[in-house]
Amino acid sequence: MSTDKGNKNYWKSINEYNDDNSLKEAKHHEFMNGVTDEFEPDQLSGISRRKFLAVLGASTAFAATACSDYADKGEIVPYTKRPEEILPGIANYYASTCTGCSNSCSTLVKTREGRPIKVDGNPDSPINKGKLCTKGQSSILSLYDPERLQEPLLKGRKISWAKINGEIVTALKTASDSGKEIAVITDEMTSPSYNKILNELSQKYSTLKIYSYKQFNQKTRFDAWEASFGTRVVPSVKFNESKIILALESDFIGKEGNFVENARLFAQGKDVVANKKMSRLYSVEGGMSLTGMNSDYRLRLRPDNQFDFVLALIDEVSARLNKPTNGIPKVTMNSFVAKNNLNEKTVKYLVDDLVENIDTSIVHAGDTLSVELHKAVNVLNSLLSGNKLYDFNNSFVEIRKLTSLNDLKTLAANSELGALIIVDSDPIYHYPNIFEDAFKNVQTKIAIVNSKNDSSAVCDYILPINNALESWGDHQVRSSVVSLQQPVIAPIFNTRQKEAILLSWINDTAEVFDSSYHAYLQSSVKELFYDLQKPSADFSKYWLSVLHDGIIELESEKLSGRLSQFSLEKPAKTTSEYTVHIQESYFVSDGRFANNGWLQEVPHPVSKVTWDNYAAVSPGTAKSLEVENGDVIKLTSGGRVLEIPVMLQPGLADNHFTIETGYGRKVVGDVGLEVGFNANILFDSTFIFGIDQVSKTGKNYKLASTQEHHALDDDFVKDFHKSRHIIQEGTLEEYLTNPEFLKEHKHDVFSITDDIEYKGNKWAMAIDLNKCIGCAACTTSCNVENNVPVVGKDQVENGREMHWMRIDRYYSGTPEEPIPSNQPMLCQHCDNAPCENVCPVNATNHSPDGLNQMAYNRCVGTRYCANNCSFKVRRFNFFDFRDHFENEYYNNDLTQLVNNPEVTVRSRGVMEKCTFCIQRIMDARSEAIKEGRELHTDEVKTACQVACPSEAIVFGDSNDPNSKVAKMRDHNLGYHVLEELNVRPNVTYIAKLRNTHSEEN
Amino acid sequence: MSQQEVESRKIFITRISKGFAGLAVLMALPGNFIAKTKNRFSGIKVNVHPNAVKRNK
């Protein structure tokens, strides 16, 4: 463990905290076990010198012949008839919408030569404001997935659209005429036009019923809001104006609600560089979430006790404010704290803060908690800030109410179903206990999906649909904004838009034309929005204008919430010793991205595990169960059994497991096949439930985690200080009392060589650790922008993941009450770079504008630079990963289209690292030269900077005194990692300040 | 030069010549054949959608 001032010990894993011998041993070796090959000269077979030379000569001759045109990538052929919109070498941008989740963020898609290569947020959107999450960034790989469905299939055989449509319409008519139900199971509805089509379809076929579901949704929030306020229009929360935020099992900046928007708003409350005020976040949860990692105070509480906690808070707050509440069961805080072993001081701080900041306090409950708990939270919020922190102009709207789980169970039990239509969903994977074998006897089963899944596997008719980037659409999830979706590429395969397919059934047309939906969408937008807004321009101009902008802003109804009288019922509590919390995966979501290599390989933001899920358990519970990392346990609940490996997670509540779903899919492409464990098997009707039995299986499963690679903070190197000051933190109070507190331990560092003067631009970056939440959107954006390859689980185990940008996560405190710290780490572009001096072929050097450059074709792969890099940010191509990963899965003509043509695709034996997006710098520079001007201040934005939802990353010219990066470089809280080495890094970190009470500091 | 030396020189020259002849035969093979069998033009056509509306960044 490293030590920092104030005797704060930093550790990255339980093993390190416990001074595990194997880890100590591993730190002394540069390479992971099994990586270096043993060379035994005695075991060489005997061969004469003559024979050796003869074989050598012959093989050289063969090699010379075979290598005559190595890796022929085809020819570049210019257009004979250039499409009007395309200028070779110049990117086009289109506004569209991401359909990765039901937030439907507006996007800006960059295309080159007619194909999309990058998806970012739409800067014109008032909701996500140019930001996009990890899933949205990586979704582009799904367009180029070689295992996408390409043709309609009938019982596995290719068939034309006209023929399959004809058969389906006949079958639907038969089912409807015989009075049998036609069930349509579809994803959560975000599109008003799609909803209209479904309504028209149900009018055409009178027995048609629509079941719209999403495994992880905000239904309990909506139901509770309706019970409390009489409406299902739920306002969003102004996290930027909240001084005290209490998150109850709520991961509002990680994966719940519009977490991209929430992260931006939350970070505005933590912007200590701009204004010396910060919000204070309390997190009360059973698992360790991203929100919990960014909290100022955290309480471990099993989720089945959350309801009583809210009642205790209501009791305490109402007494302090002298506002009695009727119909609320009473729970006293003192007894609750004692019973659940909570930290008394933290609870006191919480209550005091809520009461003293009554107008700026908000309590936010997680989506997986019960309706009753949400109703109780509404009562609590009405006692505190009331409506002040709700944004009614920006409310969430429901296009169609989600189907309840009970209705889905009724559907599964219906043995007289005439036809089943599964549209863009996978109910059999999500609810195996409900739908497994449910549809065996249904005569007509139709799947309208993008790629094969568990549900399409039982269907005879499979109709492939366009990817989101090939589709038209409109999406309204907020009262004031509609986001439009347009195809940025014509459909690559013989697929159709799902709406167009349904329209052909309504209109009885055999052939399916996407243009029919384009026309329908135009008329729908005219009816729903144009006629409402009545702009002065005619509709054709309006249509072009809204497609250009990507959004339609509406005047929303001025609503407010007034709490109606209701009573609360205590939900039944589990009597089991152990509980489990089934959660959505941060990156793979509910399984829809299981075949996306980028998302599988991004390390989990908390545990840093890749390519797998696990049962997270507290170190204390692991000790009592006598399990360690990787030990496979068997969890049994209500007759349902799951075997899953365990992962020790500091900060988890005792006797509690958290498991993410989205893994263990059986019907998926080669990337996602046999990856992880299907936690949906355990799910019954709630996400939080008791476990009847936990037992060890005696098996072990290796989890590939990146958290024990790249150990920087070891004191093995005796010439340096023990405490490396890699993470420098303080408290807000400390900073306000003494703004230069960080400089107290600094000392002068001198160089024996002359400093180089950088005239002109000098590129630098600053990262505000107060705003960085550790979401890894930067990592993914960098992967997409810079053609970073997917390496696979086995290579990640060897420490060979290729991410140019990584998020290092450190813990201080104890395994029971850890205090996490995140730090994005990338090439620091050091002015005295230790890597540049040691390259034997001068492949890495320093540019006149301060960049550490890499010439891939000079590199011979000695790896001396990576050896010398103090920050371990250099990534070596041990293989040509495009050939090596999953038997050349991504080495095909389709997936190669995802590559950014402005960035070299690196081959085997070459070192690579962050380039500060030199292609973007050159692009901006050439635009400036063309226009005869200098670069504007802050004109160049790196991919990571554009993606960061909390705007923690700032890039620019440090020689320009007006630039943001220059100001942050000189800020009192600014520091460089391993400053004492005098490598002069050009990445400045703004020290994290925790907003804790003065008594604690 | 002795008879033995002449003979060994003849053998040496013969062997080197055979080696070069073999190399020449191999290099006369279509050089791209081995590489090109792996990469074939697949005919993936990329088209811009005619009704899409582009914009500035």
Image (cartoon, coloured by chain):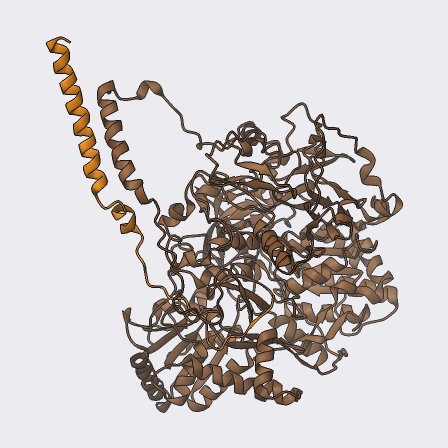
Chain colours: A brown, B orange
The reply to whether residue A690 is in sight is: yes
| Residue closest to the eye, B11 or A156 | B11
Residue visible at 75% across and 78% down in the picture: A561
A949 vs A342, left or right, is left
Residue visible at 22% across and 20% down in the picture: A50
A258 vs A741, left or right, is left
Q: Estimate the x, y position of residue A639 in percent, counting from the top left.
A: 46, 59
A83 vs A52, left or right, is right
- Considering only vertical position in the picture, is A224 above or below A33? below
Count of numbered tags: 0
| Residue closest to the eye, A417 or A552 | A552
| Residue closest to the eye, A836 or A374 | A836
Q: Estimate the x, y position of residue A439 in percent, counting from the top left.
A: 37, 73
- Considering only vertical position in the picture, is A532 above or below A811? below
| Residue closest to the eye, A389 or A153 | A153
Quarter occupied by the N terminus of chain A: top right
Quarter occupied by the C terminus of chain A: top right
Q: Estimate the x, y position of residue A675 in percent, counting from the top left.
A: 43, 52
A705 vs A666, left or right, is right
- Considering only vertical position in the picture, is A194 above or below A904? below
Question: Which residue extends farthest top?
Answer: B2
- Considering only vertical position in the picture, is A725 above or below A79? above
Q: Estimate the x, y position of residue A786 in percent, counting from the top left.
A: 52, 51
The reply to whether residue A399 is in sight is: no
